Amino acid sequence: MSAIKNVAVTGASGSLGTVIFDHLVSSGKFNITVLRRHGSSSKFPEGTKVIDVNFDSVDELTAALKGQDALVSSVGTPLLQGQKLLVDAAIAAGVKRVLPSEFGSNLDFANTRKLPVFAHKVEVQDYLKEKAKTTPITYTFVYNSAFLDWGLQHNFLLAHAEGKPSIFDGGDITFSATTLSSVADAVVGVLSHPEETKNRTVFIEDTKITQNKLLELAKKANPSKTWNPQPAKLDDITAKADARLAQGIFDFETFVPYIFRAILDPAYGGNFPKTDNELLGLKGLTDEQVYEVVKKYVQ
């Protein structure tokens, strides 16, 4: 497969998209074009090529993607299903590679694919796989399991703000975790190795960790805080989520327990047995570096 030079990015102003955009630019390897929704107030550095488009129009998306070698999508949850139109436009425009917004849990596991929170991601994956059989389009899915820094910043992986984090099923379940920066580096790595990453999943991680280890590091980073961890069970929170889903309640409270299930339940593949770190140029984090990430957000 020929080298990838021209790269279009969607969702470039989001939590992850911002970091991906920055790393693609700073790598110096690519010509970057941002596809921005009509009416968006998102700002980008002077000199950035930005095309405002209607994301519901295949024709507009196709025109915007002409001349692009790759499309990196980092759109958020509300726009995940709409990525099928992006795929159609990418095919029509002659784009070689699509990286959909699959960043996160291990959807190669059948159990994980069945979780309702991932329905749109699975739909887009299946759509891309089918299109790759009959058109020149290729794909790469990037899995990073838990977002380490984002998860701490947003009181998710360890709800540290009030010192009462929920610790699930004893807290000693090992899971893979990755910073936003390393996810962005992996995107650069995928685009730099198009043949080796063609039509497959790549697995990345910065560290393997447990909730109890995160709690230990949090206590070390903020010893003056009163810590009162709360024992919890994945079965309990997902049962409540199932009940809310049955009532037609589709919100954050309903879907979050399924994400914890995907990360922490060994039957859902959140602890990667092997990774593509070496291929993609990722070094991972030392124990001290992991501590510094925790320290940044719990003080």
Image (cartoon, helix red, strand yellow):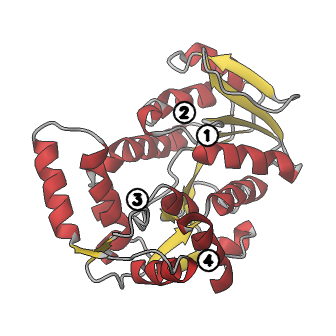
Q: Three-letter amino acid code at disc 4?
A: Val
Classify residue 251 as left or right of residue 140.
left
Measuring 54% from the left and 38% from the top, which residue is drawn there? 75
For disc 1, the neighbor class at 10 Å (few under 14, some 14 to 19, many from 20) is many
Residue type at mark 1: give it. Ile
What secondary structure is found at the residue carrying circle 3? loop
**Of marks 3 and 4, which one's residue comes earlier in the chain?**
3
Q: Look at discs 1 and 4 and give the one toward the viewer.
A: 4
Q: Which mark sits nearer the N-terminus, 3 or 1? A: 3
In front: label 4 or label 2: 4
Query: In the image, is residue 171 above or below residue 257?
Result: below
Task: Give the labeled residue for mark 3.
Answer: 107
- Asked if residue 98 can be seen in this view, the reply is no
Whether residue 248 appears in this view of the structure is yes
3D distance between C-alphas at marks 3 and 2: 19 Å
Would you name the residue on which mark 1 appears? Answer: 137
Whether label 1 touches label 4, CB < 8 Å: no
3 over 270 or under it: above or below: above
Where is 238 relative to 95, above or below?
A: below
